[in-house]
Image (cartoon, rainbow, N blue to C red):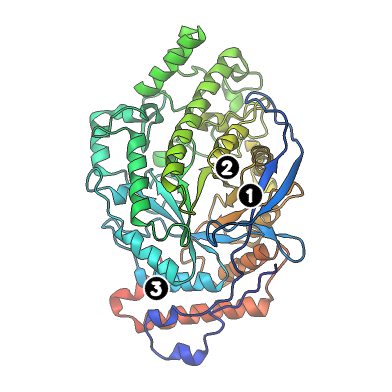
Amino acid sequence: MAFTLHSSISSISFKDIKTPKTLDDFSAATVCFPQTIRSRRLRSKISTQVAHSTPFEAGTYEIDEEVREKLHGLSSSVRSENGDSTVPVYVMLPLDTVSIGGHLNKAKAMNVSLMALKSAGVEGVMVDVWWGLVEKDGPLKYNWEGYFELVKMVQKHGLKLQAVMSFHQCGGNVGDSCSIPLPPWVLEEISGNPDLVYTDKSGRRNPEYISLGCDSLPVLRGRTPIQVYSDYMAAFQQRFNNYLGNVIVEIQVGMGPCGEMRYPSYPESNGTWRFPGIGEFQCYDKYMIASLEAAAEAKGEKDWGKSGPHDSGQYNQFPEDTGFFRHEGTWNTDYGRFFMEWYSGKLLQHSDTILKSAEIIFRGTGAKLSVKVAGIHWHYKTRSHAAELTAGYYNTRHSDGYLPIAKMLAKYDAVFNFTCMEMRDIEQPQHAECSPEGLVRQVKLAVIAAGVELAGENALERYDGGAYRQVQETSGSDLENGLCAFTFLRMNKRLFEAENWRELVNFVRSMSEGGGGRLPESETKKTSDLYVRFVIHKKISLKEDDKEAVVLV
């Protein structure tokens, strides 16, 4: 079914704009959108299981169409009238959408912005539900009010919401525009026991996320980290139960730094890591070392458990500078395979445990679960894939690191959310041996084999047509494994600049029409210009202390 965009901004007359009104007067603007669409579920006919340590081999597949029993849930890609796949587009909200005090930041500006996004044909928005904000006052003391206000506003504009259970710190990584640490009471526990956080071989502690080494230990005021995450999600489910499935259509479960399922192997804070460094293994807190020792003893190789690889180099080195990652390095020995199976296996176990709890908590709500996997594309063309290994993805010339992740997600019918969809190989520095396009192709094969849905994000903030076109190209495939959704990074004042806004409207229309549609220049220019004039007018009509709010972050 073809998507027809009728811009509510375009329907506002200049006469209306010149008449002073409240922001709420514009909230009832009408937009015509397609009815709830069917989800496409990939059904694999692979007759043999693919082992973790063997190269991936594609099988034979078919696509079945299943009608959702409820008229809600995550909208998925379908075929338009011209046979192309359509993909709903979401937009990430600012990191500081909710303030440190627990209130919705710049509510008037948010109201206007959501109305504009709706007029552009956007399906919904994504927001980080920060652990460090919600449970900051003490264990089991939750403040959801800022997010509750946001959910109601999203519902008012007829949009959907992807909620991220953000159990990580905000600040210190690319794109982080504010600082939101872990809850103060958690930081107190870390201060008394620094081994609660990930540690590199130099003893450098990383406070972004609790080490998975202590997942099952009661180290947080008598509760295990898994129990803390589960209690948090259960409290969210109880508070927002009436909105789950109809407004909140997706729960993205945070699994590590930046909300991604990985180790913090390439921290940018204080200049520790710079692109395209290989990063470092994060297995030196006492809990991870104890686990490594137990695994080595079980293997009958006690010496292998004393430490991580001694020859794996430093954050900003290249693979060939190290004994572990070089062409025929330690990674391809019995020891290297043992270590990587343990290191990646711990990450898989951590994610499986949290996702199992999430599936129980959100079962029957109509909200889809998803997990974000990082698009680590540098050194992808090398044999060892060093940067992926330090992050916990056992992906080498001889081992597929993404199929085990996809299979784990399949157990819980969770979406595989992947980044770097906007990147092209030709844009990357040659010395870094990057291949974001090759990486995306590999992930697509993995999700087909496992029978899970694939969603995408852009890794970096980009507003140019080239990035949008690359997303359109990667959103579909002859293998029938297009994206079920795409989330754009991110909403800020740059997005609403005239040219950037036109590009977004073109992109949303194109994704809704299978990647082939493009709004006429006159229509997109009218939509953008009207929005800009509308915001200017509202800025003038507000009180002096509210002016900046309308311009957004």
**How crowded is the residue under tag 3: few (<14 C-alpha within 10 Å), some, or many (20+)?**
many
Residue 2 marker: none
Classify residue 319 as left or right of residue 279: right
Asked whether disc 2 touches disc 1, contact meaning CB atoms under 8 Å apart, the reply is yes
In 3D space, how far apart are the residues under numbered discs 2 and 3 (Cα atoms)?
34 Å
Query: Which residue corresponds to the image point at 67% horizontal and 46% vertical from the top-left?
Result: 42
Q: Nearer the viewer, residue 325 or 108?
A: 108
Mark 2–mark 1 distance (CA, rounded to whole Å):
10 Å
The amino acid type of the residue labelled 1 equals Met
> Residue 98 appears at what percent x and percent y?
34, 59
Look at the picture and state if 261 lies above or below 22: above
Amino acid under label 2? Gly
Looking at the image, residue 214 lies above or below residue 475: above
C-alpha distance separating marks 3 and 1: 32 Å
Task: Identify the amino acid type marked 3.
Answer: Val
Residue 141 % position (x, y): 24, 48
> Reading the chain from its start, which is encountered first: label 3 or label 1?
1
Quickly name the residue at label 2.
375
